[in-house]
Amino acid sequence: VRRQPHVEDLLRPLAPRVLGVLARRHGQWDLCEDAVQEALLAASRQWPDEGVPDNPYGWLLTVATRRLTDHQRADAARRRREEADFAERPGDADRVPAPGEAGTTADEDDALTLLFLCCHPAISSASQLALTLRAVGGLTTDEVAAAFLVPETTMAQRISRAKQRIRAAGVPFRLPPERDRAARLRVVLHVLYLMFNEGYTATSGPALHRTELTTEAIRIARLLHARLPRDGEATGLLALMLLTDARRPARTTADGALVPLDEQDRRRWDAAAIDEGVALVTDALSHAALGPYQLQAAIAAVHDEAPTADATDWPQILALYERLRPLAPDNPMVALSHAVAVAMVAGPQAGLEQLAPLADDPRMAEHHRLDAVRGHLCELAGDPLAAGAHYRAAARRTTSLPERRYLEDRAARLDREPPPTVPC
Amino acid sequence: MKYILLIWQTEQTRAALADEDDRAAIMADVGVIMEELQETGELVGGEALADATESKTIRVVDGVTTTTDGPFAEAKEQLAGYLLVETETPERAAEIAARWPDAHYGGAMEVRALMHGSGEEM
């Protein structure tokens, strides 16, 4: 089902509110989630033709409640047949909320509760992403499937299994206990970070609708930040997304080729998003405990604020990576970016030395990013032969078409340059 | 990550499939795996292919199209089908491949990562 854009914009923020109310009234949030999904589908079928109802929230809640009651009746009937059990749930099925009922504090807690539920550690990160997009983001199953480029049946199965697992873990519709909340919040932030990256890395062609994922990730990160304004990492993540997404218009060419940061047309960056991101990260750094998302946002801010690539404040970026390293000790990608910063401040040889230990890390030894950075640093060091070999190794190892194309172009460009002067 | 699992069959696999008992056991194994992949949401697609001797190989050299029967008459292994899965890790894709009957009946499973259109600027 394709929705008209304005219907989508209207439905998505309503979805978690309706689900929250339903789950608090009836329990069994997983069944409620199915009912809300059915109500969303009904709305996207009916509203474009019949017009948007005066109270869209009330309409959705009524329809979802009816669906839920139908399911519960069917369930109860089955149970009666199976075990001669006459217990049927009563319920305030068709109650329409008063106009003022929307937008209460309970609503806000509901969105948070839902986020924690969907990002439950008992399920895989692919399932956490899918479930979050459907239950919190208000996307339909086929929209989630399209964003992840899998058939709708595959996605429906993934979501239903994820919910079964959460149900099996016996999780009530409630915020996690205070003692677990910090750890659980880290998972939520990670899921939103992954959701953003899934969308942001899309370049062109059939993958273009994946950019919807960045929009959703930013929207949900805003929702989270609004509920936890004092949490430095929730703020930092939103800032990081805005500061990264600001570069989107310049990061690919019309045909989907990747443009490296130092060659991007900075006039095409989104100045408003940069301003907002910088303000958020500045605020977080000034009052909250330092964390990896804030530092990554700060690094993105330094890049975004440089009027030209040459004007980039690399010593500042290096200093930020040095604070980030101990906070992300087991993240080889951070180590890789740190090595690039070292190279930009202290020269390519220093950067290459910094890379050496990464070759012993089994996660990195055959990773295309290590080869790509080596190629880049060898190129800077004036060894086009070694650089070309590293770029080609990276091109073989990546599973990304635009990255392979970029790396092969880079290697081909070096072939046309004069022979090496300094061994690398 | 999405992986294609290419099913390479040999004469030995085809002989097993011709035997009624072996075929029933193979189909039962396939059924268990397919059901599991459907249930986990890892199955993206998959098809079986008609016999390779019935296929055509097309080449165009200097603008001239030549058509020959079969892939390579002498080939010991032929592509019999494929599975398309999306798994959390490459190890999981390899594990599915190792359980597929062809890997046990003298054939082989080739696990190849799929390319995708997403990328990070470097």
Image (spheres, helix red, strand yellow):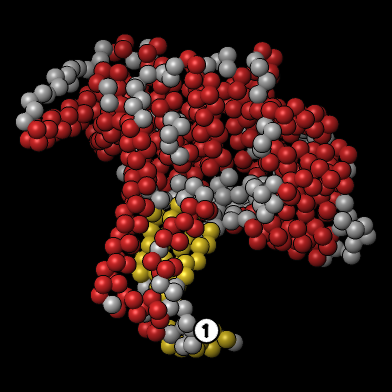
Query: In this orientation, does residue A58 appear?
Result: no
Foreground pick, A171 / B41: A171
Q: Residue furthest right?
A: A421
- Residue occupying image coordinates x 40% and y 46%: A145
Chain letter behind tag 1: B
A20 to A165, vertically: above or below: above
- Residue occupying image coordinates x 62% and y 55%: A398
Residue A2 falls in which quadrant of the image?
Answer: top left
* Left or right of A374 on screen, residue A173: left
Measured from the top left, where is residue A408 in percent x and y? Answer: 70, 61
* Left or right of A163 on screen, residue A77: left
Name the amino acid, label 1.
Arg
Helix, strand or loop at disc 1?
A: strand
Measured from the top left, where is residue A163 in percent x and y? Answer: 34, 35
- Residue occupying image coordinates x 44% and y 25%: A116
Residue A304 falls in which quadrant of the image?
Answer: top right
A162 to A276, vertically: above or below: below
Instruction: Name the quadrant of the C terminus of chain A.
Output: bottom right
Residue topped by disc 1: B59
Instruction: Name the quadrant of the N terminus of chain A.
Output: top left
Measured from the top left, where is residue A409 in percent x and y? Answer: 71, 60
Foreground pick, A226 / A44: A226
